[in-house]
Image (spheres, coloured by chain):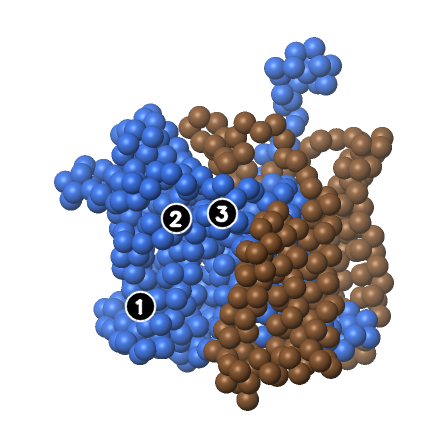
Amino acid sequence: MMESFINLGGGLSAHLLPANMLAMFIGLVLGMLVAVLPGLTLVMGVVLALPFTYKMGVEPALILLTAMYVSGTYAGAITSILFRIPGEPMDVPLLWDGYAMTRRGEAAKALGWSLAGAFIGGLISAVLMVAMAKPVAHLALRFSSPEFFAIVFFGLASVVALSGGSVVNALISLCLGLFLATVGIDTIYGAERFAFGQPFLLDGVEFLLVMVGAYGIGEVLSRLNTGFKSEDSAAKGGQSRFKTALPSIREMWRIKWTFFRGTATGIVVGTVPGAGATVSAFVAYGMESQYGKNGKALGTGVPEGIVAAKSAATASVGGALVPLLAMGIPGSGATAIILAAFLLHGIQPGPQVFVNSPELVNIVFAAVFIALVGMCILGYFAIKPLCKVLDAPEAIISAFVVLFCFVGAFAARNNLSDLYVIAFFGAVGFLFEKFKFPIAPMVLGTILGPLAESNFMTTMVSFDNDWTVLFTRPISGAVMALALFGLIYPVLKALLAHMRRPPPAARAANPGLR
Amino acid sequence: MQSRLRLCAPHFVMLLVSIALYFAASQIDTSGTNGGRRIGPDFWPKAVIIFMGALALYEVTKRVIFGSDFRAKSLTEGLTAGPAGDPPTETDGEEATIEYPRLLAAGSLLILGYVGAVNWLGFFVTTALFLFAFTWVGGFRRHGWNALISSVGAFAMVVLFMRVAYISLPLGEGPFRSLSIALLNAIGVR
């Protein structure tokens, strides 16, 4: 384990190169901007940045995206606390206590607690990430195709189980993503699949186009459909509140268990594929209200509510990077894009990356530590200009988002037909949003589909088409059982609740019954 | 009955898509499967399509035939309820989400128009026109500002992508190509 921390030094020293330093700075600023702007989510921002990393070296590309990921988990807190505008869904819990403190005139203190929570949660999780990743990768080196298929299946099942909304819709979205991943030339037999005579489909559907289209263009179409907000921003007025007052060590020690619960929840939930910072923040907030000494007061403007949510959100970063680096399974939307960055540079994250490219792993680890420090510095000093961004009319931001999507898609292959593909997936993303089909399973299905198929096919070839091997080998069997439980549990729960419901006649007579 | 049909329309579309894709999957060449002893390149996509079709069929049947509102919710549904109910949002107090189909249609046309025109007009001209039209359609209507944002924005994007990032973007045809080349020469791209 000590070796991992010594190697981290190499990753830290790589950040001294001017190109890497610049990538870190740009990543930190972009991450903060996308987190602050209500029209842009962190995942969407990282997606938009991804195509521009094509032309970069792999090191600055990974540093830029990691820095965006880290700083993006913090900055939305500022607008949540000051203006009741959650830049990200993960910042919603901060409205309950952070904004309540602002209304009492304690905005600076609330911002300080938020920064302290984010830094401590992030730091502890980063240390654990460095300590855990290599042992997990070593364990994964012993896996063969059934285990890898089971792990990918678990990742996909988790995304479905945690996607929000209907499980059936999430499964349909996942199937669509898995289908899209099969378009083009099959890698085992060389057979043409679903190209429909179109040359550009022979190369397959780039997951980048699905991601950028569904998240970027899809979101702009959704916002057009609900009408852009007026130019008058809530950020106007209250300029005097742009200050952060950090809590003292004694104050932080007083709620040490809140820090611990939030951070531990963030790390654990972060490692579950598909969960990410938002789920971590909400689960930690719920845990604090249930088990915290001051749990009953949550929602009235107490620091525990801010610290629990914020430490969990930032701690989820380290948690999500462990399965990504050690097994090639992204733990969150943003890590799915970091996975895409690896793939775009021809590197498959997983146990082999620790053997073949350990320097890249150390660079990602180091980027998390440096980004945490940078996040705190920017978060402390740059509140005023960050909040100024809220004044930008949504129509202008959306116009530039569309352009960035198109340029990003074009930069990838210099192919004009990709612009039509991206516009098509924009429409798909919009329709999914409108009819409540989650987008994340489709995107993850497109990214992990080839890995799932190749491991499944290899298993079938190696074990004479005996699919039961997925359940009879101890590790794959356990992981498959866990994945199936995650899929079946919500269905069983809903079925039981449905059966216990009073009959329709009774419900009609007494509308209070459900 | 009509409302039931409307509710299941997206799933019905997915069912039709699944059927069409299944037929397309049947056309995949499986001659390399050693006489059918090994699973072929059609197995995985067919399995995925059949599962997708089965899920869509289940939803359609449940809603149209049984009129059931049974729905298995994911594990995170309800997680976002705060200590005092749902989280406060920017739209607190508004009754329901209002939709703007005309705005959506206009915005979609502009996006499609951009895709269709960029090869002919070139990146700079198309981007400037798009920025002006999209911000205007989006409700930002200060003509001077619209013109400034579109021209400066398009120029900045040309510099950023073609001068700094060296991305090869469409130059256009005819006079638009000449304009793009003149612009690129002016910013030092040869």
What number is the disc on residue A38? 3
- Residue located farthest toward the top when viewing the structure as drawn: A509
- Which residue is drawn at the image coordinates 63% and 43% (left, top)? A227
Which residue was labeled with disc 2? Answer: A387
Instruction: Tell if the residue under mark 1 belongs to the same chain as the one under mark 2.
Output: yes
- Indicate the secondary structure of the residue bearing disc 3: loop
Q: Is residue B29 above or below residue A259?
A: below
- Which residue is drawn at the image coordinates 70% and 18% (left, top)? A503
Instruction: Tell if the residue under mark 3 belongs to the same chain as the one under mark 2.
Output: yes
| Lower sequence index among marks 3 and 1 | 3
Which residue was labeled with disc 1? Answer: A366
- Indicate the secondary structure of the residue bearing disc 2: helix
Q: Which marked residue is nearer to the observer: mark 3 or mark 1? A: 3
Q: Is residue A49 above or below residue A428?
A: below
Q: Residues within 10 Å of mark 1 (few under 14, many from 20)?
A: many
- Residue located farthest toward the bottom when viewing the structure as drawn: B190
Chain represented in brown: B
Q: Amino acid at mark 3?
A: Pro
Would you say the residues marked 3 and 2 are in contact, meaning their CB atoms lie under 8 Å apart? no
Q: Alpha-carbon distance for marks 1 and 2? A: 29 Å
Is residue B21 or residue A42 the one in the foreground?
A42
> Label 1 is found on which chain of the structure?
A
- Indicate the secondary structure of the residue bearing disc 1: helix
Q: Amino acid at mark 1?
A: Ala
Residue B108 seen in render: yes
- Which x, y percent locates residue A38? 49, 47
> Label 3 is found on which chain of the structure?
A
Chain represented in blue: A
Is A509 placed left or right of B189 in the picture?
A: right
- Which residue is drawn at the image coordinates 41% and 41% (left, top)? A236
Query: Which of the 4 image quadrants contains residue A234?
Result: top left
